[in-house]
């Protein structure tokens, strides 16, 4: 067959950017004699479905970067696009709405309401978004509780669960709104090796099953090596 007659193979469609930062800077006490810039012109693009480790020494700016990606803080300058929406210029209500529907958070400390049951904690983001509970919400929460292996404990008070179990509840809570992006800030830092591996495996499973993008901050080189990509932050700059 002549070269001109060869069938054309379409190029794979590019994946959507879930995170797109351009020249992001963050300074505290801006415009004062004690102004301190902690992020210095960050460029960062993360595609849908990627599972990225975020690494770097303490004080390097990792948490500040995550807070800006998570719309918990605003940059001093630069542009922040999350899930295809340009966030610069959005008011607090619009940022809250975008964050609530598109971003899930898992922190080093689980931040559960210990006087509520595991199931009630998982339902909290839906209650915050809709203002009421219905049977569909309960079924969604029960499904996620089951998928993190805690169906038998769903009615237990969160304060009566082990540390590893509490973190699994926190993962279910982060995923209950089916977010496109999950930000995990040292979620295994307070856990023993076995529990840390279980928490990592759960996030990895949801990443693979649903195409959920994950930014996973860790000081554990073994876990970082199991991620798809590594984002290294040193002195407020992405170096890798």
Image (cartoon, rainbow, N blue to C red):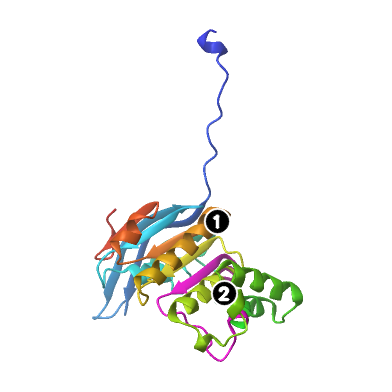
- Look at the image and tell me in which quarter the N terminus lies: top right
| In the image, farthest residue toward the front | 152
Q: Determine the image quadrant of residue 127.
A: bottom right
| In the image, farthest residue toward the bottom | 115
Residue 108 highlighted magenta (yes or no): yes
Residue that appears at 58% across and 72% down: 100
Q: Regarding mark 1 in the picture, which secondary structure is present there? A: loop
Q: Which residues are magenta?
A: 93-119
Residue 185 lies left or right of residue 119; in this view the side is left
Q: Position of residue 175 (x, y in %)?
A: 57, 68
Earlier-in-chain disc, 2 versus 1: 1
The residue that label 2 is drawn on is 150
Residue 3 highlighted magenta (yes or no): no
Label 2: how many Cα within 10 Å (few below 14, some 14–19, many 20+): many
Q: Regarding mark 2 in the picture, which secondary structure is present there? A: loop
Vertical relation: 89 (above or below) 108? above
Vertical relation: 155 (above or below) 3? below
Q: Determine the image quadrant of residue 221.
A: bottom left
Residue that appears at 37% across and 52% down: 229
* Residue sitting nearer the eye, 183 or 203: 203
Residue that appears at 52% across and 46% down: 15
Label 1: how many Cα within 10 Å (few below 14, some 14–19, many 20+): few
Q: Position of residue 98 (x, y in %)?
A: 58, 68
**Is residue 75 something that shows in the picture?**
no
| In the image, farthest residue toward the top | 2
Q: Position of residue 101 (x, y in %)?
A: 60, 68
**Is residue 195 something that shows in the picture?**
yes
* Residue sitting nearer the eye, 141 or 154: 154
Residue 236 lies left or right of residue 53; in this view the side is left
The residue that label 1 is drawn on is 84
Vertical relation: 101 (above or below) 30? above
Nearest to viewer (mark 2 / mark 1): 2
């Amino acid at each position: 067959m002549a070269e001109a007659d060869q069938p054309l193979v379409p190029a794979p469609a590019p994946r959507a950017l879930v995170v797109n930062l351009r020249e992001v800077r963050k300074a505290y006490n801006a415009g004062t004699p004690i102004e301190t810039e902690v992020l210095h012109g960050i460029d960062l693009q993360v595609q849908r479905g990627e599972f990225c480790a975020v690494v770097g020494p303490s004080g390097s700016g990792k948490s500040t970067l995550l807070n800006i990606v998570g719309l918990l803080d605003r940059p001093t300058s630069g542009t922040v696009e999350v899930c295809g929406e340009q966030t610069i210029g959005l008011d607090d209500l619009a940022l809250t709405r975008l964050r609530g529907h598109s971003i899930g958070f898992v922190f080093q400390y689980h931040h559960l309401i210990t006087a509520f049951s595991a199931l009630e904690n998982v339902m909290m983001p839906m209650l915050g978004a809709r203002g009421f509970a219905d049977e569909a919400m309960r079924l969604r929460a029960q499904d996620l509780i089951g998928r993190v292996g805690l169906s038998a404990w769903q009615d237990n008070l969160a304060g009566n669960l082990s540390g590893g179990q509490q973190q699994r509840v926190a993962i279910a809570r982060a995923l209950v709104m089916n977010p496109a992006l999950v930000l995990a800030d040292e979620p295994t830092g307070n856990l023993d090796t076995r529990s840390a591996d279980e928490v990592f495996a759960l996030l990895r499973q949801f990443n693979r099953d649903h195409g959920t993008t994950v930014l996973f901050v860790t000081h554990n080189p073994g876990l970082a090596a199991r991620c798809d990509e590594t984002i290294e932050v040193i002195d407020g700059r992405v170096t890798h």
